[in-house]
Structures are given as structure tokens and as C-alpha cells.
Amino acid sequence: MRYRNKLKIINDPIYGFIHIPSSLVFDIIEHPYFQRLRRINQMGLSHLVFPGAKHTRFEHVLGCMFLMQKTVEMLRFKGVEISNKEAEGLYIAILLHDIGHGPFSHAMEHSIVEEISHEEISLRFMQQLNAEMGGKLETAIRIFQGNYPRKFMHQLISSQLDMDRADYLKRDSFYTGVAEGNINSERLISMLNVRNDELVVEEKGLYSVEKFLIARRLMYWQVYLHKTSVAAEQMLIRLLKRAKSLVQEGQLLTMSTALAFFVSHKIDNANFSEEVLDKFALLDDTDIIAAMKEWQFHSDVVLSQLSRMLLNRDLLKMKLCSTNFEEQKVKRLQKIAALGGIPSEFIDYFVFTGTMYNRAYTPEQDPIKILAKNGRVIEVSKTAEEVSLGALSQPTQKYYICYPK
């Protein structure tokens, strides 16, 4: 049998060279489940606003693993004991934390399947990989689920200051060109420590944490919740809803076998079997794009029009407001849409309202803690008068209405 070198190096535009730490990690990266992430856009439909935002989930999770490697190295330097088995578990857990994303990431999270989050699907993928690889992912799964006895390890995977956020803010800032999100992730990592089995930030890293939270807030309003991106995502959700409705009526739609399965079946947590998992693993952005290219010529006005609008970036207009829109205004826009040729029974596909929500920091849920010079551990918003995190912990809600131009 020919020997294969598994100690590969990947050149990343954000961090430079990323080393694959073990043969097990290499085997996971080579698996078709993982390679599928190359075909899933990290930022959904944001490239319709920021043309450079075409990076994938594959790049993101490799970046997360790189930051985790740096974190393990830093914590060990500070005297935190992390065994090689635990380190590998951390690398695998962060590498696979997003493997459950469907086409266009968050845009279609509850459209392809219902009442099951991408985190739950990620866990199912991990369990399947664990079975295929002889139980070698047990530690990673326990860390991912929060069942491992060392709490700080789960916090590195999922918390308000985890490696996921540390990578996506920096990476998404780079690819969109929105400089406000460009955090110093390596500076943050150098300030991390562990006290009482919890992740803490040393006091001298206080302003780096504030910058991190401000960057997250700004990136949400400027990028992730950009009104054009949200309009496109809502149109995509309605497109799939219409496709499901037509299939239920007995119409035949041209699409891939994998997409056809999820369009013709209601899949939720109760019936998400191993067979369904394998079908889900065949789905990616290309299934949706190929379907839209066919559906734009369909006789159904909703299916064809939404497909053409998305393919040609002729999107619905979105208006934002701090209060909910009056029913009279909604009806007026619906009447205008009807005059424009949209049948009255389909108006809701083209004129609709909704809400956006943003909260950069939630002190009530696994708060970020600061390790003071005197050894005390303090929640970040209670550290000093100079650091104002009040606005960042306040929830902000905006109302929107979408309608044809």
C-alpha cells in the first residue's frame, strides 16, 4: 500500500500557512462530508451586495482550527494543562462545528429542513464520522455538546468569545472590504486564560474585547443585516416555499435528486434519519442555483419571477423603520404590486413585512469574564467606567417591508 503524506500545509489569505495537526484531522478534511463545505458560501447571498464575499464555509472552519491551534499553544504556555487528546478534540470540534449548514448557510437554515438547527445537524454528521472512524471523535463530540468535564473547552467552541466569531469577523471583514469588522484575533487569543475551569480574558485585553464587540455590532448592521442581503434571503425562502407548494399540488419541477427529496418531503428533527443525513450531504449552493436557472422559465408566475429576480439581481426593495408598518401602507403597496401584474393570490410572495434583531453582547448568557490584576474574575460590563458596553448589550430591533421596485 502506497504511503500518503497527511501533514499538509494550507496557504490562507488571512493567516498565512495553516498546518494540519494530525492524520485524523487530515482524514476528516478529506471526507466528502467536509469537502461539501467548499460548495457552500460562508455569507449566503451577501455577495449580491459585496461582490468579494464569495468565500466558503471550508475556508472559515480551517481558519477557526488555526485560531484554536494558537489558543491551545497560548494556554499551554500559561500553564493550562491540555493533553494531546484534548487538543485534537478541540481541533476536530471547531473544524466540524459548521458542517451541518445547508445551501447558502443561514439563508435557508429552516427552509430545507424544519425545526432542526445547523448545530444539531452538525452533531449528527460528527456522530456518523465517529462511527466510520472507529470512535476517534468521542472527545470532540463531548466538547462540542458541552458534556466534557472541562467547561472552558466548550466555551472555545461556542460562547460570546469563541474561535468561530474570532474568525468570521476578521474573514468576512476582509472579503467584504468592510474595515470596521477587522479585529485583532491573535491579540485576543494572547489575552486568554483559564480560571476555575472557565475562559477568562486578562485585564490588559479589556479594550480588545470592547473592540471585538463593537466590530460584531457594526458588522451585523453593515453586512449581515444589510437590507439588500436580507431582501434576497427572504426571496430565496419564498422561492423554496413556492416550489414545495407546487410539488405538493403534483407538478413536476426540474431540480437535482437531492433537492427534489427535500422539496417533496417534510423533514424535521423526528424523521432526520441516517438516510436523510446522506441526502443532506449531497446538497449545496449549486443545487439551488441550477434549480433557479430551470425555474425561471416555468409557467408559474411566482416561481419564474422570483428565480429571474434572484439570478439577475433584480431584487425587491426593502424599507426599514424603527416601528412596525401601518396596515394601510402595506395594503397600498400590495395594490400597487397588483397593478404591476402580480395576481392577487400571490401578492404575499412579493409584498411582506418582518423584523431584524441585533444584540452584540448578552451578559445573561455565558458572559465574557475579565481576570483582574488582583486575581478577581469580573463580568466584562462591570469592569471599569471607561469601558462602555451598555449600548452593546441592548437589543436593537428594526422593522422592514419588502415590495417590488
Image: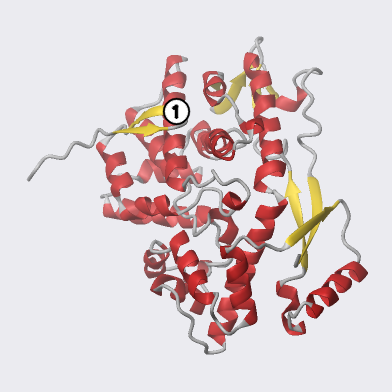
Q: Is residue 347 left or right of residue 105?
A: right
Q: Residues within 10 Å of mark 1 (few under 14, many from 20)?
A: few
Location of residue 270 in the rendering, given as x and y in whole percent from the top left corner: 51, 70
Q: Is residue 206 left or right of residue 116?
A: right
Residue at 60%, 83% in the rendered image: 300
Amino acid beneath label 1: Tyr
Q: Camera-side residue: 253 or 29?
A: 253
Q: Residue furthest left?
A: 1
Q: Camera-side residue: 158 or 108?
A: 108
Q: Which residue is mark 1?
A: 15
Camera sees residue 265 = no
Q: Camera-side residue: 88 or 315?
A: 315
Q: Residue furthest bottom?
A: 250
Q: Camera-side residue: 177 or 395?
A: 177
Residue at 44%, 24% in the rendered image: 70
Location of residue 125 in the rendering, given as x and y in whole percent from the top left corner: 40, 55
Location of residue 29 in the rendering, given as x and y in whole percent from the top left corner: 33, 45
Residue at 63%, 31% in the rendered image: 179
**On the image, which quarter does residue 217 sit in?**
top right
Residue at 36%, 55% in the rendered image: 33
